Amino acid sequence: MKLIDSNHTQLLARAMDTYTLRQRVTAGNIANADTPGFNKHRVDFEEELQRVQNSSGARGMKEVTPSIVETDQPIELEDELLEMADTQVRVNLVTRSLRHHFEMLKNGITGINR
């Protein structure tokens, strides 16, 4: 059914999966901050999503997958903590958007708006 499994919900689900991956990668960076020779890893998603959106619109965005990239940068603990906080804010926004979407569906089905 297009209302429940729409492009919007699929994109939000993909974003939530990406942010979960980003939290794990950031946690790994923090855990290995003192490991000699360990370089920072990051998750690339938003830039690729923007590029696909500009080239093929919403339909192509379902095909975007996050990728983990190893950089040559050393790990800065403060940067990792900021990344973790930023990711948590994004998770909260996606959760709120999904909740709103399904609340509207429920209201449309039941006719009750509480």
Image (cartoon, grey):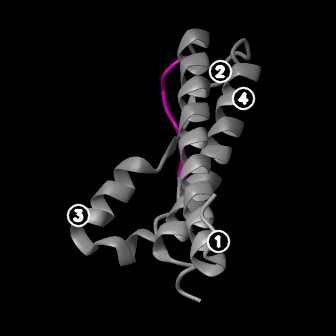
Q: Earlier in the sequence, mark 3 or mark 4?
A: 4
Q: Earlier in the sequence, mark 4 or mark 1?
A: 4
Label 4 sits on residue: 27
Look at 64% across and 57% down and name the residue there. 114
Tag on residue 54? 3
Kind of residue at disc 2: Gly
Mark 2 or 3, closer to the camera: 3
Q: Earlier in the sequence, mark 1 or mark 2?
A: 2
Tag on residue 81? none
Label 2 sits on residue: 37
Q: Which residues are magenta?
A: 67-74
SS for tag 2?
loop
Tag on residue 106? 1
Depth order, front residue of 65/98? 98
Name the spot of residue 4 as percent of width and height, x first.
60, 78
Depth order, front residue of 81/40? 81
SS for tag 3?
helix
